[in-house]
Structure formats: C-alpha cells, structure tokens
Amino acid sequence: MTTRNPQLNRNGELTHLLTLEGLPAEVITHILDTAEPFVSIAEREVKKVPLLRGKAVFNLFFENSTRTRTTFEIAAKRLSADVINLNIGASSTAKGETLLDTVDNLCAMNADMFVVRHAQSGAPHLIAAHLDAMSRTHVHVVNAGDGRHAHPTQGLLDLYTIRHYKRDFRALTVAIVGDVLHSRVARSLIHGLTTMQTPRVRVIAPRTLIPTRVEALGVEVHTDMREGLRDCDVVVMLRLQSERMRGALLPSAGEYFKQYGLTLDKLALARRDAIVMHPGPMNRGVEIDSPVADGERSVILPQVTFGIAVRMAVLSIVASS
Amino acid sequence: MKIEISRGRVIDPALELDRVTSVYIAEGAIAGVGEPPREWRADRVIDAGGCIVCPGFVDLAARLREPGLEHKATLESELAAAAAGGVTGLACPPDTDPPLDEPGLVEMLKHRARVINLAHVYPVGALTLGLKGETLAEMSELAEAGCIAFSNADAAMPDTQMLYRATQYAATFGHRVWLRPQEPYLAHGGVAHDGEVATRLGLPGIPVFAETIALSTIFALVRETGVQMHLCRLSSAPGVAMVRAAKTDGLPITCDVDVHHLHLSDVDIGWFNPHANLMPPLRSTRDRDALRAGVADGTIDAICSDHSPVDDDGKQVPFGEAEPGATALELLLPLTLKWAREDEVPLIRALGALTSAPASIIGITTATLRKGNAADVCVFDPAHSWTIRPDALRSQGKNTPYLGLELQGRVRCTLLAGHVVHEM
Amino acid sequence: MKRDALPDAEAALVALVERMAGAIAKDAALVGIYSGGAWLAERLAKRLPGPHPLGFIDVSYYRDDYALSGLKPNTRRTTLPFDVEGATIVLVDDVLYTGRSVRAAVNELFDFGRPHRIELAVLIDRGGRELPIEANYVGARVAVPRDTTVVLSRDPGGTLSLGIEPLRGVA
C-alpha cells in the first residue's frame, strides 16, 4: 500500500509519466513550456535534435494503435533515439510470457524507456513499480493509454492546445462530451484541467456513459448537451467506439448523434470564439458533424502537431531525471 | 497424554466463561476447566501466563486448493497454516479442480486431511454439477460423504429457476445452503467497488445493488422453501441493513464477513495494488464501518478468513487480470483482535464470532471447552507484535495487503483433539 | 589562485573588433551563441565593415550536460537566415571556458549543412579548456578561480559589462 507518487523520483523529478492525477501544476507547466520550442523544430528542415541519442525507446503496445504509436515513434526519432516497436497483441499471456517477464527481458536488452499501451488499467503502474523494486532507476515508463484509466500525453497535448488558444486556464469553461465512462482521455484531461485551476469543467453524456460519482473528480454533470455547451470556451468531443453504439448503453449511433453529436447549431450555444477539439480518430456523423470538424473553430489538426511536440517534451524530461 | 494449560485467561464464548484458570486435557478430550479431575498428574504443563486460552477457531471459508490447484497450495501447507493461525476446524469451498461435486472427491479430501491431522476439514459440497448452475449435484450422496453444506462458491447462478429448485431440493432433506449474495450479470466484468475509486482508476465496478438485489432474491426463496440459508461474505452497508431487517422479521438466516473487509476499503487499492483485489470487492469506508457494527451487534454472526492462496502468476499482473483473494488463515486472529480493540468489543464477543457462532453454522458442537468435548484449543498472546513477511507465513500464499505491516496477536500453541499441532 | 581584475567589457569589445576587422572573410556569417554571444554578434554586425549575415544559435539540446542539469524550457529559437552549406561562419560567444558550448554549437551547425569554414570569436578567454578548442579572435584574457563563473550583462541602454559569480550547483 505505497503512498509515494510513483511518477516522481526521490528528488521530486518526473521519472515516469503514468497519469496526470497527482502531478503538481509546476510539473505540468514545465512539460508544456518544454514542448513549445519543439513545435518550431517540426517546422525546420532539420527536424532532429540529439537529446536522446544512444537511448533505446521500446514501444510496448499490447493494444493496437497505429496513430499513437506513430506519433511516439516520430517524437522519439526527432530526439535521435533508437525506436523499437513491439506489437504484442491482445494478451501477453497468449505468448506464454507474463507482462513483467517481457519487461525484464527487454531490460536485459538495454531498454532505456518503455512507452506502454495496455487494455488493463494500471499496467504501466505495475511495470514502474516492478522497475523500482528491481532498482532499475534509469529505465522510464511513459503511459500511452491504459484501459479506461489514463492517457496522460493526450491530456497534456489537450492542455497545450487549450493554453495555446486560450492562454489562462483560470478563466475557462470546458465541456467534455461523449463516452466518459470508458474514456481515459476524459479522465486525464479532467485531472489536468482541475490541477491547472480551470473553474468549470463539464461532462456531457447520457447517464449510461457517465461513471459513478464522477463529480468527485471536480466536474459538473450535464445530460442535456444544449445546457452543457452554454458559454463554453472549449468543447472536447470524445470518440464513440463502434461496439458501444448499439447495445446496453446506447440504442443506435443515429440517436446518439441527434442528442450528443456536435453540429453547428449546437456549437452556436458556446462562446463565439470557442474552440473544438477531438483526440481522433473522428467518427463523422456520430459524435461530430463534418462542417464543425472542418470548420474554422476546429483545432483538431493542430492538436496532432502539438501532440508530437508534447511527446518530445515528455520523453526528454523523463529521460533526463 | 495428560496436558494442563495453566495460568491463562480462559475465554469460552459458548460457556460464557472468562477468567484466569487452568484447562485439563486427557485422552484427547477436555477433562475439566478450573477443577482438575481426581488424581490429576499432568504429563505436560503448558504455561499460558499472559495468554488467552480459548476453543480452537472455526473458519467458515478456507481454500486448501486441493484437489487440482496444487501449484497454488497443498493440504500440507494450508493445514499447517491453519494450525499456525489457531484454526482447528475449517470449511473449504467446493471450487477445487474438479469441484467437489462427487462423493469420491469429498471422501479423498477428508481422508487426506485426517492423515495430515492438523485441523478438522468440513467440506462444502457443490450445489450444482461442475458449479455450472445447470444441474443439481447429488446432495444426499455428498452429505453422506461428509459435506456439511452446499454452495455454488463464486460461480454465477444466473438462472433463478435453477436457484429456486436447488434451495427447494436442499430444503427437502434439511441440507444447508451457503450462498454469496452477488447478482452475476451486474457483477460481470467488475473488479472493484463501483464508486469514486473505481471511477478514478478506470476499473470496471460492481455496484452495491448487485448484493442487495441478490439478497432480495435469496430472502424470497428462503421464505418460499424454508431452506437453512447462510449468506457468505457480506460487503455493504445496505446489505447489512437488509440482513438486520430480515432477521428482525424472523427469517432464519445467518451470515459472515471476511476479516479483511472489516478493515480495508477501496481506498486501499492505492496505485492498483493487486493484493487488494478481493471478491466481493472492498467497498467504501461507510460500508466497512457498517460491517464492523454488524458484527458487534450480532447481525453478522461470524468472521471468517476467506483464505485464498494465490501465487505470483495470479497477482503480479495488472489489477483487472489478477486473481482475487488474500491469504488469511494466519491473519484471522490478529485482524479480529485489531477490530475488537479499536471498536471496544469485549473479547468474549469477538472470539464468539470465531468459535461458537461458526460452529453452529456448520452444525458441529465442538468449539467449546465443555467437559468431554474434543480438546481443540488455541493459546494465543494478544500482545505479541509481528511483521507479516512471506517467511513468517506457513501458507504457500503470501498474497495479503498487510505484507510488510505489523500486527498484534499471535498463536503460541494449538491443540487438536488433545495433541499439540502447532507451537511457537 | 591569483585572481585578475575583470576587464571592461566595452573596452574588450573594441579590441575584438580591431582584431576581426580585415581578418574575417567579407561574406562571413556571424552566428551568436545565446545569450551573451547573441548580444555580441549584434554589436559586431554593426561595428564590422559589412554586411555580414547575422544568425543566432541555441545550444540547449546539444549540450552534453543536459542529463545532469535537466532540460531547461527557456530555450530560444536557433535562427540561421543563410545557407549553412558551404558557408564561412564566425561563431561568437561571450566567455570561452571549457569549450563545451562551442562544441555543441559546431555540432548543431553541422546538422544544418556542411560549412566551408568555422572560426571562433570570443570576448573573454578565461582558460580552463576541457576540449581541444581555441578561439581565432579574443577580446581579452583573464584568470579567475575555478569555482566561479564569468557573466556578461547588458543594461537597458545596451551597454555591456562583465561580472563574476560563484558557480551554482556543481555537477
């Protein structure tokens, strides 16, 4: 029953990035500030810096995701790191090897960093605790998404995007719309926004997609999207996975779109200069309408650019701890 | 062999006895308490000064993992753990591999336990074949082989018709039925209490109403069939309240709680500690407090260990993949004492939840130091502090949330039918 | 260790300009290393007969002590408004000490292309080299204790001055 924040080492430096929950605001700000110059590096001809030269970054993806894996790969390579991709598929035990055995084997191959995506909440924490127990203090873990629990780099790039367009978190009303129940993106963003003192964070969804006692995370719950969007500065649309669209939680994608899809007329209820965000990939016509996704308030494409810079910042910071 | 246990504080909840005196044992039975038998000459004197002497504990749920799951534990190791924990009689659930749905398996288990001779084993038989919830098991044959009750362990029984018929059949022959109140569809896929902690950690939750809905169903079936029902492992405040109301109404039910649930809540999951993965899940602090009050006021009859040894392969995995359960035979006593101390429950009441109450639920008359009874005795030092470390546990299971922590209360000596089976 | 008095920065700059004028190539680019070298490069660009292309380089990502001192987010952008490929470059820095900043700057320049020639101009050389690097043009030399750092400052009017401070957080 350890109470020490496993992400910070004994000097208080960020040595793993597992979740935004419990990260001090100074650490978050440091990451965002570090990311800023990396955005312009992407615009140079020479997009590389040697910060992680000689380091081996292993992408341990137990859950498929070409998008996230690719952005991490680009980020690591821009830092001159060696990147090795391991797609282990649905279950590590399918190979007959446990998760921790896989980690130990890769450490023996001189891994410096693990970027981990796993279907089970807590998998990156397990790996970080194991590395700590084995005294491998020079090996770092970055969570690329674990179950429903956290997607901290996505949360950070969302924070970066909001800060880029809106400057001060302390004046904002932010709405997160969609399947919050299953969303690690939502949880990370909520932790990030509340840490940065955003006064009004709203979740908008039908009751079946709202987690139990989510108010305890510091959000207001709305089931009426028009009510929830009123005067918002930022609207974040979550992706609705196809397996959720029909069944016990929702009757159909059509009915969902009618009630909770973002269209121009619903967006009109937000502030005139509100920005629209989406972690991607989008389901056009399900959670978001094309005129909105391609419209002038949408910052969905810049999110991707910022995502690479933020991941470069995270990799550099944990590697230097 | 004539044994005298002297100078101990003798507490026998069944006899309402609590005083410093001696216990006399001869030919495997209690020969006297306070008064030595005529012409008494002890072959051995056990000095219990500073200790408590009580009937050996009766544990309503301890998984021994045999047959079939010997990589997790064996009868030798777990019965040694029982003796080290002061447990002289234990009921083992039917979820072995294969499950205890065949008289031959039950006989073999009882025979093995007798040969090892470290604790009495009272097998709970499977309610349905293979625990699949589809066909009744041969309850009368199994009872003849030694099963003291029937249960579907943790296996789901979603077919209510089946549940009704199983309780009806058991009631026909006066067999006891032990059920876990957990509605299987609501619990499906859940690994933690459905509340704030599960939401923060992104863990699928099991809501409280999975327990209360199941309790409603079970109460209705008890009213209908008259079956002797025991509820296993209450976990919630509303659940305790329902049991309290049902008992007030005169419903003949008993229930238990496992000792870890008296102390821990979902907050103790911390950063996904797999040792806090238990079934039923650890619920909120409010639920925990209601469980503690429930044992204190008698709504909950007994405290058990729900002993479940799990190896590293079952625990050193992400939380949602971990096998639920904790090793608990050796923590039953110190954790019960901790609760009693904290809530100022008289020791005689607390020990009653470990001795006379579970004994009556199983239907045995031991667990008391009445003259003539088999001498199943526990001598423990309530003040002895020890650290829960893997090498301090006899069980093969080292999986407990209390690893590395210090607890107070340790068994000094355990006697089974007048023989010393454990000694520190 | 004997400690010299620090020279006057503006005087050292005059000496540096004298040594560079006529010696550097007519089309040489002046590239100042942030932040002291950047101020100097600006002043040199105005004083030297020109014109010389003016660039600025931030070496934070190329330093070899990044792992020890951590990543400082206050980085300015490297700006090189000329083609590095085949260029003649004069790197400008305020204080030459161990030589590590210059090593980082040279490495970074090579990431942009292959220069024809790189020279080094510094306002102050304080000795204490840890790499085989020397300046082609030096304003003034000075000896100071090892546990100190020489700092160039610029006041709001643009006047440069030198100061000495104890070394913070020895690695």
Image: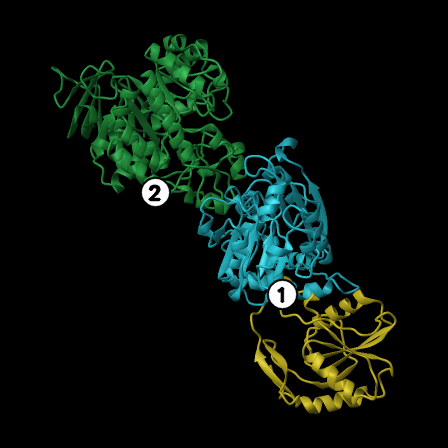
Chain colours: A cyan, B green, C yellow
Question: Is residue A245 rendered to the left or right of residue B36?
Answer: right
**Amino acid on which disc 2 is placed:** Arg
Mark 1 Cα within 10 Å, few/some/many (few <14, many 20+)? few
Residue found at x 78% / y 73%: C80
**Amino acid on which disc 1 is placed:** His
**Percent position of residue B309, x then y:** 45, 29
Q: Is residue B330 above or below residue B228?
A: below
User: Label 2 lies in what chain?
Assistant: B
**Percent position of residue B393, x then y:** 40, 32
Quadrant housing the C terminus of chain C: bottom right
C-alpha span from label 2 to label 1: 44 Å
Quadrant housing the N terminus of chain C: bottom right
Work out whether disc 2 and disc 1 sit on a shared chain. Answer: no
Q: Is residue B395 above or below residue C94?
A: above
Question: Residue B2 lies in what quarter of the image?
Answer: top left
Residue B286 marker: 2
Mark 2 Cα within 10 Å, few/some/many (few <14, many 20+)? few
Q: Dot 2: what SS?
A: helix
Residue found at x 59% / y 66%: A166
Residue B383 shows in the view:
no
Nearest the camera: B265 or B195? B195
Nearest the camera: A288 or B165? A288
**Percent position of residue A243, x then y:** 62, 37
Residue found at x 56% / y 70%: C169
User: Label 1 lies in what chain?
Assistant: A
- Return the residue at label 1: A164
Nearest the camera: A288 or B257? A288
Q: Dot 1: what SS?
A: helix
Q: Is residue B85 above or below residue C140?
A: above
Residue B299 shows in the view:
yes
